[in-house]
Image (spheres, helix red, strand yellow):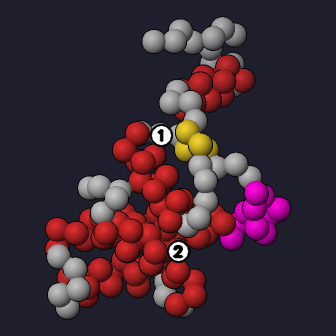
Amino acid sequence: MASGSSAFTRGVERGLDSGSTGASLLHDIFGTRTLVLGGEMESDESADYLSGVLIGNEIREGRAWAMRHGAANARIVLIGAAALCERYASAFTIAGLRTVSGDANAAAHGLWRLAQQAGLTAKRHPVAR
């Protein structure tokens, strides 16, 4: 699945625009089969399209939440597997938003700190590998 594929881009655009069409996420997900059956999309493109719909919808909902909570201008940091972060970066670009890459070990460091605060470990830092 390539984040630069036209099916992924089409899906992101649909997910970003779902609010204005009045369609629910569930409608858009099940509508994928209709696009394939109607010849508007090849079946092997459906996974990229669905990924785009989900990520686009998440970005749209996240933007709405950020606006309601005064965080519309907050920095967007992507943390995770490289391939997934690439997809999100592409989708945020389509949405007109900039992102930065976070520390690849952020989740491990966060979990370590939680374990420390919960008293599950000695108060020392994990060894970087």
Is 105 rendered above or below residue 63? above
Determine which residue is flagged by label 2: 16
Q: CA distance from mark 1 to mark 2?
A: 22 Å
Q: Position of residue 79 (x, y in %)?
A: 53, 40
Is 56 rendered above or below residue 87? below
Q: Is residue 44 magenta?
A: no
Q: Position of residue 8 (x, y in %)?
A: 35, 66
Instruction: Report the side of 108 relative to 82 (left or right).
Output: right
Residue in the picture at 55% in, 44% down: 78
Magenta region, residue range: 64-73
Residue in the picture at 69% in, 71% down: 64
Q: Is residue 21 visible?
A: yes
Amino acid type at image mark 1: Gly
Q: Position of residue 76 (x, y in %)?
A: 64, 49
Determine which residue is flagged by label 1: 80
Residue in the picture at 66% in, 24% down: 113
Quadrant where the N terminus is found in the figure:
bottom left
